Amino acid sequence: RAMVASMHLADATRQHTLAAQAARDKLEELQDADFAQLFVLYGSGTAPGPDFAVEGLTSASDDEDGLCGEIEFPSTDGQLLEKLARPELGMPRDLDGSGDLDEDDHALDYALLPVRILVRWRTDGGPSQVEVKRFLAAR
């Protein structure tokens, strides 16, 4: 039993390491990309888009696209919104640096971009996840 438990623990550790590394790699990719294009490229459904595969992990059973990784921005219907209530992203928040919160779409004029990278996968013991949250800003 101890050997089997040790093997399960080693597999769970391997999977968590894969997920954490994939999230860190995706964050680095975002940080290296053109800041002004981040939301268009990764948030509004264009290529490469918000979803990504993680080799070695099986997607969560409720994941419709079968990809374990997801990039989240404070958006709805393709709009980047300041007043969107998303506490996991530190929202609401002034995204364009105007000093106030408005109802406008800031997909083209943000100065600050909250991002959450989530990797969700299925294990023998049930669902598991890793998340990385950051505020990205122009350099």
Image: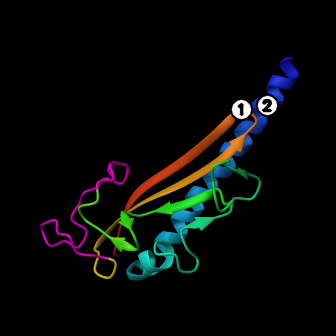
The reply to whether discs 2 and 1 touch (Cβ–Cβ < 8 Å) is: yes
Which stretch did the figure color magenta?
85-106
When asked about the image quadrant of residue 97, the answer is bottom left
Q: Earlier in the sequence, mark 2 or mark 1?
A: 2
Asked if residue 45 lies left or right of residue 122, the reply is: left
Magenta segment: does it hold 41?
no
Magenta segment: does it hold 87?
yes
| Up-down relation of residue 76 to residue 117 (above or below) | below
| Up-down relation of residue 69 to residue 13 (above or below) | below
Q: What x and y, as percent, mark residue 138?
A: 34, 75
- Secondary structure, mark 2, is helix
Q: Nearer the viewer, mark 2 or mark 1?
A: 1
Quadrant containing the C terminus is: bottom left
- Secondary structure, mark 1, is loop
* Residue annotated with mark 1: 125
Q: Nearer the viewer, residue 28 or 123?
A: 123
* Residue annotated with mark 2: 8
Please tell me which residue is depicted at 49% across the width and 70% down the height of the picture. Answer: 30
